[in-house]
Amino acid sequence: QVQLQESGPGLVNPSETLSLTCTVSGDSINNYYCTWIRQSPGKGLEWIGYVSYSGSTNYNPSLESRVAISIDTSKNQFSLRVTSVTAADTGVYYCARSRGYSSPLPLWGRGTLVTVSS
Amino acid sequence: EIVLTQSPGTLSLSPGDRATLSCRASQSVSSTNLAWYQQRPGQAPSLLIYAASFRATGIPDRFSGGGSGTDFSLTISRLEPEDFAVYYCQHYGISPGITFGPGTKVDIK
């Protein structure tokens, strides 16, 4: 059974960098696109960006200047970095996997809550 | 940029009722790039419908999707207790990537 699991600090200080990792188990990460999505408390879903198995990326224009997504196929993991965080970056962060950039997201992690606060 | 609008914001119904949810795109989109997700409280979203009308693996046939161009719909023929949740439509494509609608909450009347 394929599973995705997000991990990383649950609390980040304002102006610092948020770093999360998504570990895929039960299947190789090769040949998939890996996506990060977040959800602010009580709000809807916001696409952050994705990375392909070859390392190409595409980001939400509203976050592009502060976001980096990378992939490590040797560890079956992909990662998210968001710099200069503010309280507006607080929320549940989900990783998800798809077959391509023009594909739906059939597999999601359970999500991890990140709070930006001093 | 494609903007998705969902209506109504909240739908109050009873178990056994029929639910019809709407998703409208700001410009015409290919139906192959439109999906619906269900999110129960405290859980991650889960894929219900892709390519506008195809049920994802394991999704019961009381869920159906349709539409084309700018207007799409999700219908739940008879609401079960576990169907009371928030539903999001999604457009996926190369540019600007992925867009979600604001969601429709289906709650118990």
Image (cartoon, coloured by chain):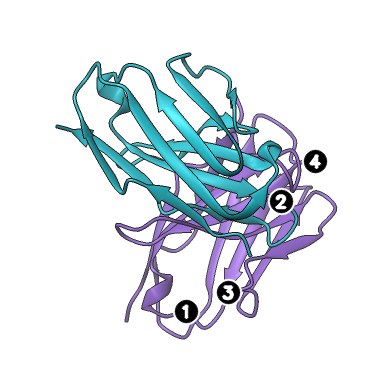
Chain colours: A purple, B cyan
Of badges 2 and 4, nearer the viewer stands 2
Return the disc, 3 or 4, that comes first in the chain's sequence.
4
Kind of residue at badge 1: Val
Q: Where is residue A28 in the image (x, y as percent from the top left)?
A: 75, 35
Q: Do labels 1 and 2 share a chain?
A: no
Q: Mark 2 points at which residue?
A: B93
Kind of residue at badge 4: Asn
Pointer 3: residues within 10 angstroms few (<14), some, or many (20+)? Answer: few
Residue lying at 46% horizontally and 15% vertically, measured from the top left: B60
Q: Name the residue under label 4.
A: A30
Image position of A71 (left or right of B28): right
Q: Is mark 4 on a helix, strand or loop?
A: loop
Of badges 2 and 3, nearer the viewer stands 2
> Compared to B23, does B13 lie above or below?
above
Q: Mark 1 points at which residue?
A: A85
Distance, label 1 to label 4, CA atoms, is: 30 Å
Residue lying at 74% horizontally and 48% vertically, measured from the top left: A101
In front of the other: B32 or B48: B32
Residue lying at 48% horizontally and 37% vertically, measured from the top left: B37
Of badges 3 and 4, nearer the viewer stands 3
Mark 2 vs 4: CB contact within 8 A: no
Q: Which residue lies furthest to the left in this view?
A: B109
Q: Mark 3 points at which residue?
A: A62
Q: What element carries label 3?
A: loop
Of badges 1 and 3, nearer the viewer stands 3
Of badges 1 and 2, nearer the viewer stands 2
Distance, label 1 to label 3, CA atoms, is: 14 Å
Residue lying at 42% horizontally and 16% vertically, measured from the top left: B62
